Amino acid sequence: MMTEHEKLLAGQDYDYRDPELQEMLAHGKKLVNLINTTSDVDARATAIQQLFGKAGTGLVINGTFSAIYGTHIRVGEDVFINGNCTFQDSNLITLGDRVIIAPDTKLYCGAHALDATKRFGTRTDGTKYLITYTKPITIGDDVWIGGNVTIIGGVHIGNNVVVAAGAVVTKDVPDNTIVGGVPAKTIRPLAPLN
């Protein structure tokens, strides 16, 4: 039988009140709070390393940052995350090397059923719970994500991509592409990196 955490990562209906998940949430909340409030540079760097499942060298988080679990986030080398970014990491969020994320960007792994009658489940004790399904988000190497971008769970963004400010990315983005708009569409190709 799968744990609630395993169900979460598999994109299945899971119970967020599960003790393991609640412990992970509390741990993530504590570290996010420390990251956003401490003026001690070393303590902040340590908290970032403890929060993320993997944090490459050269990672910079400039300003406030929000995550749910933190441990589901894997970040490559030389990544820059600007202020007021939200990583709703109810599944894996993977950033490649040399990713730049502008302010106010949101990565949302979780979603709910379109059918309103399927958004809440009933536990064996009769209490209701919100049903959430999750999908991972993967961002390749050498990607620049503009300000106020939203990326939805299940999206894979390739290498050498620019996502224009204000875009809502709901589908995969191929390598060497500029995308923008709501929903994001290809604007033009980019020359491949050497």
Image (spheres, rainbow, N blue to C red):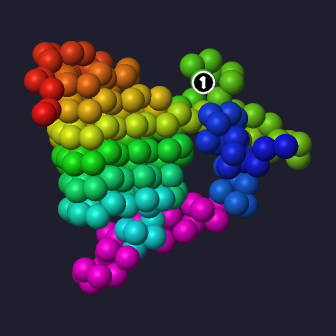
Q: Amino acid at mark 1?
A: Ala
Position of 158 relative to 24 (above/below):
above
Determine the residue positioned at 73% across, 55% down: 18
Determine the residue positioned at 88% across, 46% down: 125
Q: Looking at the picture, tell me which residue is in the foreground, 115 or 144.
A: 144
The residue segment tinted magenta is 22-46
Q: Is residue 40 magenta?
A: yes
Q: Is residue 14 left or right of residue 50?
A: right
Q: Looking at the picture, tell me which residue is in the foreground, 120 or 31.
A: 31
Q: Is residue 151 magenta?
A: no
Circle 1: element type: loop
Determine the residue positioned at 53% across, 43% down: 91
Q: Which residue is mark 1?
A: 113
Q: Position of residue 86 (x, y in %)?
A: 36, 49
Q: Position of residue 185 (x, y in %)?
A: 24, 15
Which part of the image, by quadrant, shows the C terminus?
top left
Please say whether residue 157 is visible from this viewpoint: yes
Determine the residue positioned at 48% across, 59% down: 53
Quarter assignment of residue 170: top left
Q: Is residue 162 left or right of residue 113?
A: left
Q: Looking at the picture, tell me which residue is in the foreground, 122 or 57.
A: 57
Magenta-highlighted stretch: main secondary structure? helix
